[in-house]
Image (cartoon, rainbow, N blue to C red):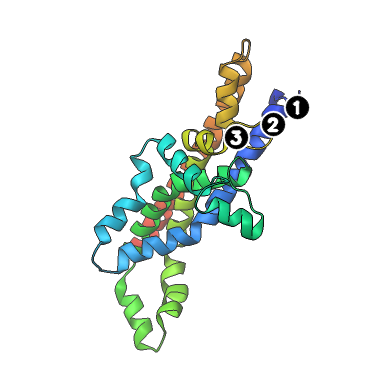
Amino acid sequence: MSWLGLTPVEMEAVRLSLWVSGWAVIVSLPFGILAAWILARLKFTGKTALDGLLHLPLVLPPVVVGYMLLVLFGNRGLLGAWLYKMFGITIAFTWKGAALASSVMAFPLLVRAVRLSIENVDRGLEAAARTLGAGPLRVFFTVTLPLIVPGVTAGALLAFARSLGEFGATITFVSNIQGQTQTLPLALYTLTQVPGGERAAMRLCIIAIALGMGALVASELLAKRYAAQMKG
């Protein structure tokens, strides 16, 4: 037994969950900011369809998302076979696949939080920067991005919390392999299927609640700070 009475297997599941969730946020953050900026600032045909597509993981069964990822990134998938042939990279049934599944499921929450932040930025500030000769990229990095940092952070924390709880897409795409893809929710599920695993399952349940609540509280505090800054 080790920290908080957890066994090495349980500790590994917690560690892997934090690792996977962290990478899920890191990988999806640049794409989430770009998608949010496109939806908040641009007008084009098909914008509604794009918005619906980006938010589709919120309404689809996670198993469907996991199966689609398996079709695309499996060893014989459209992209998975190419990645393995060209770079020797395997996504399915690895922690990288777990991070990908988590990032896809959490992506809509990230985009929504960042989009709301961008929409609340005074466009007059951006216009003033452009009149002073700043290009679009410079305006974004020197004016828009600093103003939306609290919103981006809040969105990242929401995505992190969602990634910690990801189950359906993960188990479908990367299976439940101890020490490789068995994140905290998968380990908890395994323990509920084992006689006498109730106490260990409860320990992991408490840890999951604590981690998720911590991320949500931090996100809420940052959102309130951002709202106060915008009013100021």
Give me the residue at 53% from left, 51% from top: 25
Q: Earlier in the sequence, mark 1 or mark 2?
A: 1
Q: Amino acid at mark 2?
A: Met
Viewer-side residue, 7 vs 207: 7
Single out the mark in the foreground, 2 or 3.
3
Residue 131: numbered disc? none
> Which mark identifies residue 183?
3
On-image quarter of the C terminus: bottom left
Alpha carbon of mark 2 to alpha carbon of mark 3: how far? 10 Å
Looking at the rendered image, the quarter that the N terminus falls into is: top right
Residue annotated with mark 2: 11
Give percent across and percent down for residue 127: 32, 80
**Neighbours of disc 1 within 10 Å: few (<14), some (14-19), many (20+):** few
Whether label 1 touches label 2, CB < 8 Å = yes
Of discs 1 and 2, which sits in the foreground? Answer: 2
Residue 129: percent from left, percent from top: 38, 82
In the rendered structure, the answer to whether residue 186 lies left or right of residue 59 reads right
- Residue that numbered label 1 is attached to: 2
Relative to 5, does residue 37 appear above or below in the rendering? below
- Tell me if residue 35 can be seen: yes
Considering only order in the chain, which callout, 3 or 1, is on the residue closer to the N terminus? 1
**What type is the residue that disc 1 sits on?**
Ser
Q: Residue at x 55, y 46 (%)?
A: 76
Of residue 193 and residue 152, the one placed in the foreground of this image is 193
Q: Position of residue 26 (x, y in %)?
A: 56, 55
